[in-house]
Amino acid sequence: MSYQHQYVDGTRIHFALGKVVCIGRNYAEHAKELDNPIPSEPLLFIKPGSCVVPLAGGFKIPTERGSVHYEAEIAVLLGKSLSPKPSEEEVLDAISGFAPALDLTLRDLQGQLKEKGLPWERAKCFDGACVLPPFVPVSAFEDLADIGIRLTINGEVRQDGNSALMLNPIVPMIQHMASQFSLQAGDVILTGTPAGVGPFNVGDELVLELPGVSRFESRVL
Ligand code: ZN
């Protein structure tokens, strides 16, 4: 199923999906669980728009390529392009909305690539590697330093984080990303995953939510 940006009320968002700019190890507890050091500067990578699929109705995972880990993350939708040195106000003005996203990762393969010092694309950019529900408009959020993110699988809460725990908070993170890559309307920012990552299995029933703001049910097909 092809993906198109939309808001939770069903309104289609007029700009097309761009790229997905991601940050790794943005929560100390998650860096620790994978035995990774906390980076001295933000660890950035990009998923192409081609790997994005909608959450609604379920999604497939490539289990034939090894373990597929879920990473629940707060996703930010950009509605405006940013200059390479945007002010805090410009970043705030460019944010259209937020959604709970899944950054799917072929964890075994990523481990092999990391060991050899090779790029992560094969582990992070496969078709279906970014799963997105509709966005909630930014006007619904009062404090960007207090946005929850929760993933429940088969009735058990597996990840339960909050933007308050981010090592790089949302606005400075986007300022840094903009200094490295052109950020454009339709791009999505994935803000890192809290602790609790693990493998998905076919048939898993999940609830992905920004607690108190938006809640979506889906399943692994
Ligand atoms: Zn991630």
Image (spheres, helix red, strand yellow):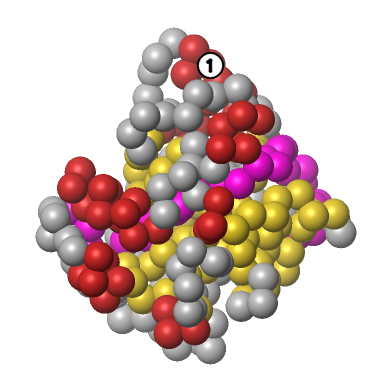
Q: Position of residue 163 (x, y in %)?
A: 53, 58
Up the image or down, 114 lies above or below 156; here it is above
Drawn side of residue 147 relative to residue 196, left or right: left
Residue at screen point 21% across, 70% down: 90
Under circle 1, the secondary element is helix
Q: Which residues are magenta?
A: 181-206
Up the image or down, 155 lies above or below 24; here it is below
Q: Magenta includes 35?
A: no
Q: Position of residue 21 (x, y in %)?
A: 35, 49
Provide the residue designation for mark 1. 112
Q: Amino acid at mark 1?
A: Gln
Q: Position of residue 58 (x, y in %)?
A: 67, 62
Residue furthest out toward the right: 155
Quadrant holding the C terminus: bottom right
Q: Position of residue 74 (x, y in %)?
A: 52, 59
* Residue 58 shows up from this direction: no
Residue at screen point 61% across, 78% down: 213
